[in-house]
Amino acid sequence: MSVKIKICGLMREADADAVNVAMPDFAGFVFYEKSRRCLTAEKARAIRSRLDPRIRAVGVFVNMPIEKIAELARLVPLDVAQLHGEESAGDIEDLRKLCPDLEIWKAARVGDDFDPKSLEKYKNADRLLLDAYVEGYGGKGKRIKDERLRGIDLSAIMLAGGLNAGNIESAVKAFSPYGVDVSSGAETNGLKDAEKIKEIVYIIRNINQNEV
């Protein structure tokens, strides 16, 4: 097992500097206008330009027109588009035609009525991400209830929702996801915290090393 790490919601050039020190696998940029972490294309491009090229850039989108996603993916530029709204399998195919080299992730929100079989409709995505269901498409630091994850093979799935240095090790050991996605859990007073980022990355790297 080699769990991947995504630090999401970079908002400042200092955030790029912080992840460059910690070296997660992915860094996320939010383009959802209702999020306090939403970036303009120009701001995202400036932060992206400081990012270590070994860290893959992920753009997070919620129900944005596919043509606009493709435009931002080229401009920033992005390695991955994470579709976090009600996008369909057809939308994924349309985006792939416009950006054949762009990796596409589809997020699913896990609430009390979540049916794992519903993930089948997104089988044309390159990767799935599970996030906790909250009004407004996630991003509120809420955990997925453990009982909702039992029985789901997460070995190819990113796990998000309320993860932080205090609970990420137990979540990884319990569910063995492909990767973990951390946003608010790497913040202090609403801003990315370099020490928290380093701690989270250290925890996951330590798990990976001990599992070899």
Image (spheres, rainbow, N blue to C red):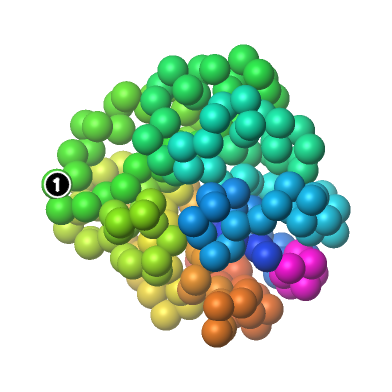
75 up-or-down from 93: above or below: below
- Taking the spot 45% from the left edge, 48% from the top edge, the residue there is 158
Quarter-wise, where is residue 50 in the image?
bottom right
Q: What residue type is labelled 1?
A: Asp
Magenta residue span: 12-18
Q: Is residue 177 magenta?
A: no
Up-down: is 197 above or below 72? below
Name the image quarter holding the C terminus: bottom right
Q: Report the predominant secondary structure element of the magenta stretch.
A: helix
**x and y percentages locating residue 54 in the rendered image:** 78, 50
* Residue density around tag 1, few if under 14, some if 14–19, many if 20 or more, within 10 Å: few
Residue underneath mark 1: 113
> Which residue lies at the image location 18% right of the left edge and 39% below the top edge?
115
Query: Helix, strand or loop at disc 1?
Result: loop
The quadrant where residue 103 appears: top right
Q: Position of residue 58 (x, y in %)?
A: 63, 46
Above or below 189: residue 81: above
The residue lying at 56 percent from left, 27 percent from top is 66
The furthest residue to the left? 113
